[in-house]
Image (cartoon, rainbow, N blue to C red):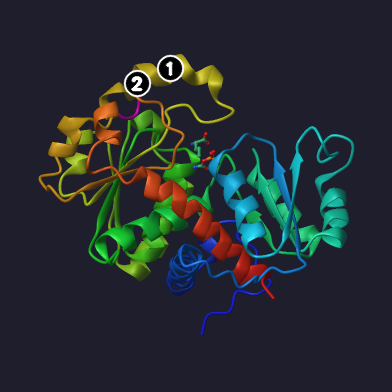
C-alpha cells in the first residue's frame, strides 16, 4: 500500500515505479471525479505557497486550480514579492514559510534551492521546475501515455533536441524508473551529463528499460511509440539562442521524422510552451498524432494528485 503523506516531490529519483504509478492512477481518478462534478476537498483548510522565480502558465495554473478544487488556499509568491535569496537566506525563508504553510511549490533556477526549502521548511515541497529537473511534467506525460495506450509497458519514448535540459533529464529519470525504453537524439555537444546517465543506468537495470543516446535523429526515432521534444532555448539560457538554432535544426520534429518511426501509431508529446518552426513544425503539433493539449490538461490533474497524496487530510 503506497503512502506518500508528508513526502516532498523534488525529483522522480526519489520515487519508485509503484509510487509513480500510484500518483498517475490517483490523477486519473481525480480527473474522472472533476469531470463528474465530484470534489472531495482533500486539502480543506490548507495553505499552499507557490514560489515562482521563472514564469509559468501550466504549472502555476495547475497548482492554483488544484488547490482551489480541493479546498486549499494558494498564495502566489513571485520572486520580486518575497525576500528569498535576496534579503534573507533560503534556509530562513524556508523556516518561516514552514510555520505558515502546509506545502510549498518552487519553480526556479537551482535544484539546491528546492532542496533547501525541503530540508528547512518541515512541510512537503514540490518541484515546479528547476534548471535540472521537471518531475511534475513527467507525471502528466505518463498519464497521457496511459490514457492513450492503456499502459506504458513495452513502449519506446524518443526525445529529440537539447539533451541536457531539465526535460531530457526528467524524462530519462522517469522512463528508467518505469521500464520505458528511452532514446535521446541530440548533438554530442548537448548530450546529458555522465552523472545523470550513470544514475539512470542503475534505475534501468532494475526496471529493464533500455537507454540510448545518439547524434542521429533518424536512427533515434526508429520504432518510437512516443516522440517528445522541448524548446531549444530554456528559460535562463536566452544568450545561447543563436548557437542552439544553428546546431539543433536537424532535430526538429517534422513529418519526415514522424514517418521515420516506421509506425503509424506513434504519438507526439511536448511539455509546452512550444516554438513552432523550431523544435516542432506546425503540421506535427496540430496533426492527428499530437496529444499536447491532453498532456497540458493532465498537468492539473497530476499536480493535484501530488498535493493530495503528500499534503492531503
Ligand atoms: N510545461 C510547463 O511547465 O509549462 P509552464 O512553463 O507554462 O508552467
Ligand atoms: N526546458 C524548458 C521547459 C519549460 C516547461 C525550460 O526550462 O524553459
The residue drawn where x is 16% and y is 51% is 265
Residue nearest the viewer, comparing 194 with 311: 311
Residue nearest the viewer, comparing 204 with 286: 286
Residue 307, compared with residue 52, is above or below; it is below
Judge whether residue 68 can be spotted in this image.
yes
Q: Main secondary structure of the magenta part?
A: loop
Side of 62 where 186 appears, left or right: left
As drawn, the residue found furthest toward the left would be 262
Classed neighbour count for the residue bearing mark 2: other residues with Cα under 10 Å, few (<14), some (14–19), many (≥20): some
In the image, which residues are magenta?
277-281
Q: Is residue 232 magenta?
A: no
Return the residue at label 1.
Answer: 243
Measured as percent of width and height from the top left, residue 43 is found at 69, 68
As drawn, the residue found furthest toward the front would be 37
Measured as percent of width and height from the top left, residue 225 is found at 22, 52
Side of 41 where 26 appears, left or right: left
The label shown at residue 247 is 2
Classed neighbour count for the residue bearing mark 1: other residues with Cα under 10 Å, few (<14), some (14–19), many (≥20): few
Judge whether residue 138 can be spotted in this image.
no
Which type of secondary structure does the marked residue at label 1 adopt? helix
Picture quarter containing residue 249? top left
Name the image quarter holding the C terminus: bottom right
Measured as percent of width and height from the top left, residue 106 is found at 68, 48
Residue 171, compared with residue 36, is above or below; it is above
The residue drawn where x is 53% and y is 47% is 133
Q: How many marks?
A: 2
Picture quarter containing residue 167? top left
1 and 2 marks in contact (CB < 8 Å) = yes
Amino acid at each position: 500500500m503506497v503512502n506518500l503523506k508528508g513526502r516532498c516531490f523534488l525529483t522522480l529519483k526519489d520515487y519508485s515505479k509503484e509510487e509513480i504509478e500510484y500518483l498517475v492512477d490517483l490523477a486519473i481518478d481525480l480527473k474522472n471525479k472533476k469531470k463528474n462534478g465530484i470534489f472531495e476537498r482533500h486539502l480543506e483548510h490548507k495553505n499552499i505557497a507557490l514560489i515562482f522565480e521563472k514564469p509559468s502558465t501550466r504549472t502555476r495554473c495547475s497548482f492554483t486550480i488544484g488547490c482551489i478544487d480541493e479546498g486549499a488556499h494558494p498564495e502566489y509568491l513571485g520572486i520580486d514579492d518575497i525576500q528569498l535569496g535576496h534579503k534573507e537566506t533560503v534556509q530562513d525563508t524556508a523556516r518561516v514559510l514552514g510555520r505558515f504553510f502546509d506545502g510549498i511549490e518552487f519553480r526556479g533556477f537551482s535544484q539546491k534551492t528546492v532542496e533547501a526549502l525541503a530540508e528547512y521548511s518541515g512541510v512537503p515541497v514540490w518541484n515546479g521546475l528547476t534548471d535540472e529537473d521537471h518531475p511534475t511534467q513527467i507525471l502528466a506525460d505518463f498519464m497521457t501515455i496511459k490514457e492513450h495506450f492503456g499502459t506504458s509497458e513495452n513502449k519506446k519514448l524518443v526525445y529529440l533536441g537539447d539533451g541536457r535540459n531539465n526535460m531530457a533529464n526528467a524524462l530519462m529519470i522517469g522512463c528508467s524508473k518505469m521500464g520505458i525504453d528511452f532514446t535521446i537524439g541530440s548533438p554530442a555537444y548537448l548530450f546529458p551529463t555522465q552523472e545523470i546517465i550513470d544514475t539512470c543506468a542503475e534505475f534501468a537495470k532494475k526496471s529493464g528499460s533500455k537507454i540510448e543516446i545518439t547524434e542521429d535523429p533518424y536512427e533515434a526515432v526508429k520504432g518510437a511509440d512516443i516522440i517528445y521534444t522541448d524548446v531549444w532555448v530554456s528559460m535562463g539560457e536566452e544568450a545561447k539562442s543563436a548557437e542552439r538554432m544553428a546546431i539543433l535544426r536537424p532535430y526538429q520534429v517534422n513529418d519526415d521524422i514522424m514517418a521515420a518511426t516506421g509506425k503509424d501509431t506513434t504519438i507526439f508529446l511536448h511539455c509546452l510552451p512550444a516554438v513552432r518552426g523550431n523544435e516542432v513544425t506546425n503540421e506535427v503539433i496540430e496533426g492527428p498524432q499530437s496529444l499536447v493539449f491532453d498532456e497540458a490538461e493532465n498537468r492539473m490533474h497530476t499536480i493535484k494528485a501530488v498535493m493530495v497524496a503528500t499534503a492531503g487530510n
